[in-house]
Amino acid sequence: MEGRVYLVGAGPGSPDLLTLRAVELLQQADVILYDQLVPVRLLDWANPQAERICVGDLPGKHADKAVLIHQRMVAAARQGRRVVRLKGGDPLIFGRGGEEIAALRAAGVPYEVVPGVTAALAAGAYLEIPLTHRHFASALAFVTGHEAPDKAEPPINWRALAQFPGTLAIYMGLCRLPQIVAALLEHGLSPDTPAAVISRVSWGTQRSVFARLAELDQ
């Protein structure tokens, strides 16, 4: 039997927001490699006989762990096993899914990508924030608040983002909130711009703060 890897989006955290395809694959999985930020309760849907590996428990730094994850996926698939790589949110939105696809292609391992509800969309729905609006926001930008230190491309263009004619959804930015607010203000975004900070959306510990941009980091 030919093995296969499934890069599955786990959604923002609530089991209710898993897709039917995600649940189906969890129930059929032989191996599940799940992110540290994926709530363990999502594994209640999984095949009870499946091998479960939290990638956060693998040894080494981020780059080393990424290599180990790739190796584990490839090795298990070559053994004819169904491998679910369970990733928070959507696999291809700040989820390193592109790197994992490249590794699977290089190894000649068949795979499938299963989309998940990304955090910004869940936050908009749960907190009733329209991310687009015909009168106020005709575009939506997903932005990382925490860039890779070895990134080859130029850093984030905060000047362009401050002038962006729509909604900015900034991921992983909580620890750099003062710097992000300062950069947007410095490059011309109005201090009165409505803003919100949301963490652990859809979890039981969800928290949110609404404020003017200039007051957001206070």
Image (spheres, rainbow, N blue to C red):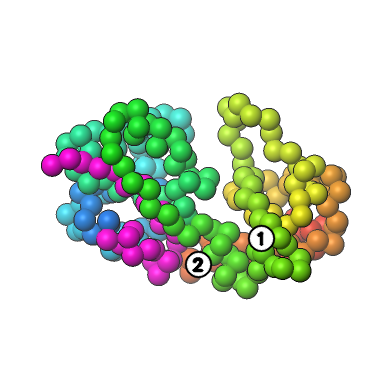
Q: Quadrant of the N terminus?
A: top left
Question: Bounds of the magenta span?
Answer: 1-24
Q: 86 or 109: which is nearer to us?
A: 109
Q: Which mark is residue 93?
A: none
**C-alpha separation, residue under disc 2 versus residue under disc 1:** 14 Å
Q: Residue at x 33, y 58 (%)?
A: 22
Q: In the image, is 20 to the left or to the right of 155?
A: left
In percent of width and height, residue 18 lies at: 39, 63
Q: Residue at x 40, y 57 (%)?
A: 10
Check disc 1 and give the amino acid type. Val
Locate residue 191: give its quadrant.
Answer: bottom right
Q: Earlier in the sequence, mark 2 or mark 1?
A: 1
Q: Which mark is residue 202?
A: 2
Q: Is residue 20 magenta?
A: yes
Let me know if residue 33 appears in the view. Answer: no
Let me know if residue 156 appears in the view. Answer: yes
In percent of width and height, residue 83 lies at: 26, 45
Q: Which mark is residue 197?
A: 1
In percent of width and height, residue 214 lies at: 82, 57
User: How dense is the environment of label 1, judged by Cα within 10 Å: few (below 14), some, or many (20 and up)?
Assistant: some
Q: Is residue 16 magenta?
A: yes
Label 1: state its secondary structure: strand
Label 2: state its secondary structure: loop
Q: In the image, is 25 to the left or to the right of 118?
A: left
